[in-house]
Image: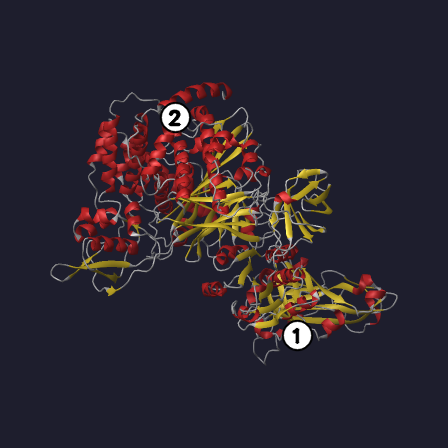
C-alpha cells in the first residue's frame, strides 16, 4: 500500500536545543560552527512508502524533510561516529558528496554478528550529502531475520530510505545526523508490513566517545 | 671493484667520450680552421682555466697558494658564494670545485685550509645578522688570462653590451609580468601564501686558529668582521643526497631498483640498458618486447652502478636472465598452471605448481611455452622458495578513517591472509596509542579463522605507534617473518626511525601506504606497496604482498598484441620431464594499473622536493621512453663566477687538447658547465620572478632529461628541465616564488612557461569538491586523489597550478609526467628509422652538443649520424656486458670488443685507430677518471643562452659581468677548434656522401 503523507513538521534537532530558561534567549543552534547556508526543506516531496499496514498507523506521519540549519552538509563529515552504540566510520567524499558509513569490528558475540553476520566493513549507511539540499538523501542498509534469506532472498538485505534527515549538533558540540525511516516485518509470502517509524540518531563521537 | 672491471669501465668511458668528441668536431660551422696558432690558443685556454681555478682545486694546493689564514678567509669571502641549505653537504674539496657552500661547509673548508698551513684550530658559532645582508661576493677579480683569450680571438668584451643588457632586462620584465598575471589570477581562487620570514637554515661558524703568539685569532668565511659573542661548536657529519629509482608495479608494489649517492661536485647520470637479449635489441625493431629486461645504470665519477632489472611492462626481474645451459633441468612429472595474471598486460605471468623440488634451479631454457600454438619466449619471474611467516600490523589510529583507508586496509589484509596458506604462520596486531595483539604467530587450517582474528582489532583507537605491535606480533627468534604494516603513514619521522631499527635478521618489514607517503617510507622499510585509493584494487595489493613472501614458480612472457576479449590458450611443457599444463585467459584491454619508474632524491631519510615519474611503463612507448638519458645535479643553487669560468675553459681546453693530441689531455673536474650555469640561472630567475631575494633552506635538485621518440619518419628528442627540488625557494618565497620557479624553468630552456600558457588560454578549476575529470593524464589524477589541493589547469589537464591548503603554489606539467619545461626539436631526420641501433646513435649524436650548438642543425648531425650510431652502439654493447658482469659476476672475460665490432659494424682497431689509441693511452694515464658518459650532460646544452643568463644573474644580485662576453668567446672558440683526426676525416668523407642522399629533407 502506498501512502502519501503531505503534512506535518518534523524537527529532529530539537533535542539539541533545550527549552530556554524563562526570559532567556534560546541558544544558537549553530554555536558550534556554521559551514554554509541553512537548509530547511519541509514537505518537499510526497513520502512514498510501499508497505502494508501503514494505514493503521495512528501517529503523525513524518514528511520528507531536510533540515540543516548550520550548513553541515558543506562540512567534511568523515570520521568516527556511533550508530546504536557501535563504532562506525564515515567517509564523506567532498568531490561527489558521497557519504558512506560502515561498521568497524563487530564483536563476535554480539547479535549483529551472531544473527545477521554483520562484521567489519558492513555499510550501514549510504547516500549523498552535498551542497544541494534537495539532492540530499541517505539510505539505511537493513537486514531481515536470517530465515528470510531462504524465503525471500531478494528482500533479505534491503535498503530503506530515510524520509526525514536532519543535521545539527548535540549539547557537546558533536555533529548529529538524525533520520526517520519506516521499519517493517516480512512474512513467508514476502509481504512487508509496516511496524513503526524509527528514528536513528547517529553522533560523530570521535575516537574516545565509543566503546568498541 | 676488480682491476679488470675498472679497466673495462674506463674503456667504456673512452668510447662514450669519443662519441661526444666526434660530434663536437663535426657540427656546423666547425669546418677545419687553418689556424696556425692552435698551440698558442691552447696555452691561453690553460691559463684562463688556471686563473679561474686559483688558488687551487684541492685543499693542499690551495693552502700552499694562499699561505696565510687571513688570505684563506679572504679567498672564501671573495670567491665562494654563500648558499642556502641546512646541514653539511660538501667536503672542502667539493667547495673548492663549485665555489659555493653554506656557512657550515664554508667553515669546514676554511678550517681545512688553515690546518693544512699547520695551525691548530677550533670552531665558534655566531649569530647571523638580524637584518638582511648582501650575499654578493665583494671583490671583482682582475682576469688577465680570460681577457688574453678574448684578445687573441679579437673579441671586444664591451661590444654589444648595452644590447645584451637590454635584452636581458626585457626578459626579466617579461618574467615578472608572467608571475604577476598568474598571481593576480590565482588570487581569485585562494588565499595565496605570502613570503615567510627569511631565516638562514645553516649555522654561522667562525674558525679560530692559534697564532705564533699562542693567541686565538678568529676568521669569518662570510663576513669581513668576525662577530662577537661566540660560543664553542663542532661541525656536524655530512648528510649525503641519494638518488633512488623505484619501480611502481601495476598492482601497487614499490620495488627499489637502485640508488646512488650523488657527489656534491659531480653530476650523476642515469640511463637504461638492456639487461638481456642484446642481439634482439640491436637487430630488431624498436618495440618494448625486443628487450625482455632493462636495467638502470647510474654513472658518476668514472664508475657505473647497475641497478636491478625490470621488464618494460613494469615487473621486477626477480631472477636474473641467465642463459645457463649447464644447469640441469628439473624433473617434472606433474604440473599445473594455478594462476594467470594479466595485470601488467601485455606481460603475462603464470603461477605454476610442479612436483619439482623447491630448490630446483629453474632457467628459461627449461621451459617451453606456447600461446595459441605459437612458441613464445618465456622467462622465470620467480623461483619456488621457502615461505615466510606473515604478521599483519594495521594502523587503527583516527587518521585511518580518511578516504575510508581503514576499510581498504581491511581488504588488503583479507586478501593477503587468504593467499597465505599453511604451513605459513600468521599473526596480527593493531597499532594505535596502545598496541593490541589479535593473534600470536600460529597456523590457521581455516583461512577464515585467520581473517576473523585479523579483523578483531579493527576498531579505531586513539594514538599513533606503529612499532609497538611489531614487537608483539613478530618477536625475533621464531623464524623468518614478513611484517606487513598497513598504514596511512601519518606518523612522525621518529616512527620511521624506529621502524627502520626493527628491520634485519629474520624480520623484513613491508609498508603499505598511500602514494604520497611511499617515498618517505621507502627509506625505513624493506619494501613499500602503495595503498590504492579504493577497495576494488585492494585484493591485488594483498596478492602482491603474498607473492613477495615467496612460494611458487612464476613464468612470464610478453603476449602478442591482439583484440581485447580474445581467448588465448597456453600450453606449457618442460625439458626435464613429461608433465604438461594448459590454461586459457581472455586478453584484457590493457594493464590494470599504471606501472612506472620513479626517481626521488633522499637526504637524511627525507625526500628532497617531490619524487618524479621518469618513465611510464607498460605502454607501447615504454621502450622508447627507456632510451632517455637523465642527468642530475644537486647543489646549493648559486655558484661563483670562477666556478663557471673554470668549467667553461676546462671544457674548451680539453677539446683542444684532444684535437691536438696533446699528451696528458684530461677533462676538467667538477660539474659540467651547462648544468652549473643552469642551476645558477634557475635560482637567479626565481628571485627575479618573485621580485625579492629568497633564502631557501634545502638543496636544489636539477634533472635534465633527453628522451627520443619516433615522429613519423623522423626522430624527435624532447628535452625536459625539471627541478626535483627547488631548494626551498617556493616554500620560503610564498606563492609568487612558486610561480617564479615555473617561469624560471621555462626560461632556462627558452620556451613558453606554463604560467604564460595558462594565463592566456582556457582554464578549468578542480577543487576538493570537484569530481576528477575523465581522460586526464594519470599523473594529474594521482596528484589530486585524496588531496585537499586545488588545481587550476588547462582543460586537458596537461599542465596547471597546484594550490595547496596553505596557499603555496607549484607549477605542474602532467603530460608527460614532469614538472618544469620541455622542448621538442627534430635533431635528426631519417628516411626510415631502420632499427633501434639508429635510435641509440641519434640520441648520442644529436644531444652531445654543449655550448649552444643549435638543436635545429639537422643536416650536419644527420651527416655524421651513421658513423656515430655505430660508435655509440659499440659503447652500448660494452655497457650491456658491464651490466651483466655486475650482476652475474662473470669470471671469464667475454669478447665484448669483438661482439661490439660485429654487431655494430665497426672496426675499432682501424676506423677509429687513432682515437682508440689515444683513449687507451688516456685510460692508462687516468685521464678519464671523472667522466664516463657525456650524453646526459650535453642534454642540457643548447637551452642555456649565455648572454641572457649571466646578465639576468647580474640583475639578481650576483655580479658576474666578466661572463657577459662569454657567448662570443664560445662562438669564436668553436671556429678555432682543431680539425678531426686523419682517420676520422676519411671516414666522414664517405659517410657524409652516402648519407646525404638518404636524408635530404
Number of numbered tags placed on the structure image:
2
| Front-lying residue, B440 or A110 | B440
Q: Vertically, is B144 above or below A66?
A: above
Alpha carbons under labels 2 and 1: distance apart: 81 Å
**Residue A15 location, x and y as percent?**
64, 75
Judged from the image, the secondary structure of the residue bearing numbered disc 1 is: loop
Q: Which mark is on residue A85?
A: 1
Visible in this render: residue B756? no
**Residue B481 location, x and y as percent?**
57, 64
Residue A152 position by quadrant = bottom right
Visible in this render: residue B311? yes
Label 1 resides on the chain identified as: A
| Front-lying residue, B373 or B114 | B373
Judged from the image, the secondary structure of the residue bearing numbered disc 2 is: loop
Residue A80 position by quadrant = bottom right
**Residue A70 location, x and y as percent?**
59, 65
Q: Is residue B302 left or right of residue A28?
A: left
Q: Is residue B766 left or right of residue B940?
A: right
Q: Nearer the viewer, mark 2 or mark 1?
A: 2
Q: Residue at x 32, y 57 (%)?
A: B200
Q: Which mark is on residue B26?
A: 2
**Residue B772 location, x and y as percent?**
60, 50
Amino acid at each position: 500500500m502506498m501512502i502519501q503523507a503531505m503534512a506535518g513538521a518534523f524537527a529532529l534537532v530539537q533535542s539539541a536545543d533545550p527549552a530556554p530558561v524563562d526570559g532567556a534567549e534560546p541558544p544558537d543552534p549553530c554555536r558550534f560552527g556554521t559551514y554554509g547556508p541553512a537548509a530547511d526543506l519541509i514537505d518537499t516531496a510526497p513520502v512514498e512508502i510501499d508497505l502494508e499496514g501503514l494505514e493503521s498507523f495512528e501517529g503523525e506521519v513524518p514528511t520528507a524533510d531536510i533540515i540543516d540549519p548550520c550548513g553541515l552538509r558543506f562540512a567534511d563529515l568523515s570520521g568516527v561516529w556511533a550508530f546504536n552504540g557501535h563504532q562506525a566510520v564515515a567517509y564523506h567524499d567532498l568531490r561527489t558528496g558521497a557519504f558512506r558509513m560502515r561498521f568497524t569490528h563487530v564483536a563476535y558475540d554480539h547479535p549483529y554478528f551472531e544473527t545477521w553476520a554483520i562484521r567489519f566493513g558492513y555499510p550501514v549507511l549510504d547516500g549523498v550529502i552535498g551542497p544541494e539540499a534537495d539532492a540530499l538523501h541517505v539510505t539505511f542498509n537493513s537486514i531481515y531475520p536470517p530465515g528470510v534469506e531462504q524465503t525471500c532472498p531478494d528482500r533479505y538485505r534491503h535498503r530503506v530510505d530515510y524520509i526525514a534527515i536532519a543535521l545539527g549538533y548535540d549539547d557537546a558540540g558533536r555533529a548529529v545526523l538524525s533520520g526517520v525511516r519506516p521499519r517493517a516485518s516480512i512474512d513467508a509470502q514476502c509481504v512487508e508490513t509496516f511496524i513503526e517509524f524509527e528514528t536513528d540518531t547517529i553522533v560523530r563521537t570521535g575516537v574516545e566517545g565509543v566503546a568498541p | 671493484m676488480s682491476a679488470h672491471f675498472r679497466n673495462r669501465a674506463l674503456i667504456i668511458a673512452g668510447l662514450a667520450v669519443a662519441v661526444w668528441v666526434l660530434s663536437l668536431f663535426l657540427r656546423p660551422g666547425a669546418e677545419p680552421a687553418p689556424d696556425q696558432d692552435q698551440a698558442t690558443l691552447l696555452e691561453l685556454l690553460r691559463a684562463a682555466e688556471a686563473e679561474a681555478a686559483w688558488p687551487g682545486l684541492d685543499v693542499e694546493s690551495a693552502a700552499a697558494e694562499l699561505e696565510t689564514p687571513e688570505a684563506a678567509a679572504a679567498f672564501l669571502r671573495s670567491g665562494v658564494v654563500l648558499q642556502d641549505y641546512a646541514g653539511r653537504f660538501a667536503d672542502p674539496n667539493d667547495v673548492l670545485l663549485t665555489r659555493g657552500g653554506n656557512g657550515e661547509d664554508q667553515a669546514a673548508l676554511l678550517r681545512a685550509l688553515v690546518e693544512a698551513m699547520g695551525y691548530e684550530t677550533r670552531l665558534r658559532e655566531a649569530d647571523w645578522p638580524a637584518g638582511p645582508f648582501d650575499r654578493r661576493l665583494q671583490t671583482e677579480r682582475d682576469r688577465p688570462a680570460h681577457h688574453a683569450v678574448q684578445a687573441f680571438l679579437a673579441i671586444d668584451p664591451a661590444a654589444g653590451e648595452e644590447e645584451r643588457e637590454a635584452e636581458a632586462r626585457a626578459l626579466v620584465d617579461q618574467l615578472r609580468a608572467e608571475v604577476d598575471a598568474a598571481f593576480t589570477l590565482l588570487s581569485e581562487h585562494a588565499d595565496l601564501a605570502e613570503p615567510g620570514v627569511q631565516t638562514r637554515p645553516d649555522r654561522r661558524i667562525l674558525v679560530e686558529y692559534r697564532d705564533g703568539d699562542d693567541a686565538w685569532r678568529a676568521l669569518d668565511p662570510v663576513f669581513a668582521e668576525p662577530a662577537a659573542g661566540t660560543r664553542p661548536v663542532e661541525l656536524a657529519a655530512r648528510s649525503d643526497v641519494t638518488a633512488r629509482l623505484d619501480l611502481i608495479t601495476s598492482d601497487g608494489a614499490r620495488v627499489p631498483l637502485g640508488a646512488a649517492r650523488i657527489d656534491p661536485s659531480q653530476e650523476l647520470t642515469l640511463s637504461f640498458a638492456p639487461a638481456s637479449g642484446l642481439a634482439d635489441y640491436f637487430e630488431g625493431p624498436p618495440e618494448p618486447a625486443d628487450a625482455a629486461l632493462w636495467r638502470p645504470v647510474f654513472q658518476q665519477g668514472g664508475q657505473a652502478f647497475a641497478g636491478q632489472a625490470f621488464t618494460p611492462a613494469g615487473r621486477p626481474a626477480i631472477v636474473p636472465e641467465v642463459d645457463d645451459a649447464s644447469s640441469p633441468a628439473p624433473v617434472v612429472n606433474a604440473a599445473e598452471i594455478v594462476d594467470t595474471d594479466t595485470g601488467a598486460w601485455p606481460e603475462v605471468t603464470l603461477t605454476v605448481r610442479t612436483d619439482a623440488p623447491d630448490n630446483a634451479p629453474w632457467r628459461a631454457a627449461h621451459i617451453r611455452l606456447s600461446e595459441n600454438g605459437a612458441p613464445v619466449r618465456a622467462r622465470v619471474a620467480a623461483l619456488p622458495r621457502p615461505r615466510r611467516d606473515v604478521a599483519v600490523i594495521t594502523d587503527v589510529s583516527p587518521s585511518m578513517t580518511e578516504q575510508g583507508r581503514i576499510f581498504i586496509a581491511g581488504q588488503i589484509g583479507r586478501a593477503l591472509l587468504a593467499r597465505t596458506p599453511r604451513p605459513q604462520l600468521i599473526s596480527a596486531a593493531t597499532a594505535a596509542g596502545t598496541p593490541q595483539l589479535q593473534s600470536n604467530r600460529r597456523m590457521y587450517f581455516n583461512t577464515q579463522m585467520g581473517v576473523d582474528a585479523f579483523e578483531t582489532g579493527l576498531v579505531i583507537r586513539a594514538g599513533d605507534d606503529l612499532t609497538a605491535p611489531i614487537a608483539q606480533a613478530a618477536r625475533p627468534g621464531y623464524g623468518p617473518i614478513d611484517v606487513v604494516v598497513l598504514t596511512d603513514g601519518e606518523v612522525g619521522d621518529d616512527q620511521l626511525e624506529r621502524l627502520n631499527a626493527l628491520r634485519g635478521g629474520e624480520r623484513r618489514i613491508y609498508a603499505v601506504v598511500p602514494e604520497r607517503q611511499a617515498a618517505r617510507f621507502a627509506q625505513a622499510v624493506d619494501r613499500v606497496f602503495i595503498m590504492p585509493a579504493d577497495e576494488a584494487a585492494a585484493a591485488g595489493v594483498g596478492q602482491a604482498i603474498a607473492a613477495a613472501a615467496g612460494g611458487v614458480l612464476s613464468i612470464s612472457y610478453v603476449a602478442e598484441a591482439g583484440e581485447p576479449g580474445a581467448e588465448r590458450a597456453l600450453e606449457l611443457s618442460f625439458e626435464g620431464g613429461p608433465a604438461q599444463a594448459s590454461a586459457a585467459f581472455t586478453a584484457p584491454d590493457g594493464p590494470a594499473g599504471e606501472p612506472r619508474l620513479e626517481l626521488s632524491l633522499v637526504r637524511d631519510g627525507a625526500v628532497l622536493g617531490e619524487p618524479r615519474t621518469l618513465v611510464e611503463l607498460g605502454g607501447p612507448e615504454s621502450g622508447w621512453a627507456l632510451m632517455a638519458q637523465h642527468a642530475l645535479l644537486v647543489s646549493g643553487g648559486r655558484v661563483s663566477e670562477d666556478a663557471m669560468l673554470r668549467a667553461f675553459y676546462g671544457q674548451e681546453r680539453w677539446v683542444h687538447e684532444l684535437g691536438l693530441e696533446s699528451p696528458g689531455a684530461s677533462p676538467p673536474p667538477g660539474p659540467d658547465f651547462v648544468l652549473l650555469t643552469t642551476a645558477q640561472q634557475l635560482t637567479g630567475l626565481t628571485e627575479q620572478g618573485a621580485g625579492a631575494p629568497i633564502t631557501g633552506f634545502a638543496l636544489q635538485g636539477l634533472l635534465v632529461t633527453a628522451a627520443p621518440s619516433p615522429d613519423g619518419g623522423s626522430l624527435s628528442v624532447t628535452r625536459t628541465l625539471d627541478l626535483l627540488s627547488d631548494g626551498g625557494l617556493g616554500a620560503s618565497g610564498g606563492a609568487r616564488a612558486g610561480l617564479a620557479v615555473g617561469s624560471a624553468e621555462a626560461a632556462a630552456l627558452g620556451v613558453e612557461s606554463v604560467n604564460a600558457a595558462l594565463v592566456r588560454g582556457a582554464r578549468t578549476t578542480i577543487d576538493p569538491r570537484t569530481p576528477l575529470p575523465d581522460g586526464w593524464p594519470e599523473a594529474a589524477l594521482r596528484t589530486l586523489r585524496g588531496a585537499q589541493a586545488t588545481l587550476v589547469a588547462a582543460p586537458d589537464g596537461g599542465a596547471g597550478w597546484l594550490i595547496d591548503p596553505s596557499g603555496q603554489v607549484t607549477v605542474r606539467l602532467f603530460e608527460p609526467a614532469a614538472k618544469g619545461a620541455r622542448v621538442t626539436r627534430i635533431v635528426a631526420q631519417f628516411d626510415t628509422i631502420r632499427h633501434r641501433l639508429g635510435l641509440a646513435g641519434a640520441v648520442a649524436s644529436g644531444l652531445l652538443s654543449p655550448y649552444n650548438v643549435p638543436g635545429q642543425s639537422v643536416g650536419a648531425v644527420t651527416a655524421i649520424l651513421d658513423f656515430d650510431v655505430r660508435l655509440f652502439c659499440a659503447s652500448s654493447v660494452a655497457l650491456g656486458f658491464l651490466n651483466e658482469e655486475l650482476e652475474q659476476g662473470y669470471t671469464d672475460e667475454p669478447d665484448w670488443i669483438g661482439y661490439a665490432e660485429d654487431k655494430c659494424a665497426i672496426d675499432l682497431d682501424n676506423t677509429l685507430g687513432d682515437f682508440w689509441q689515444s683513449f687507451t693511452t688516456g685510460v692508462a694515464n687516468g685521464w678519464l677518471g671523472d667522466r664516463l658518459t657525456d650524453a646526459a650532460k650535453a642534454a642540457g646544452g643548447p637551452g642555456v643562452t649565455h648572454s641572457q643568463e649571466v646578465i639576468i644573474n647580474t640583475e639578481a644580485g650576483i655580479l658576474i659581468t666578466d661572463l657577459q662576453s662569454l657567448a662570443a668567446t664560445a662562438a669564436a672558440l668553436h671556429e678555432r677548434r682543431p680539425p678531426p683526426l686523419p682517420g676520422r676525416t676519411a671516414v666522414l668523407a664517405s659517410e657524409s656522401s652516402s648519407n646525404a642522399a638518404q636524408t635530404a629533407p
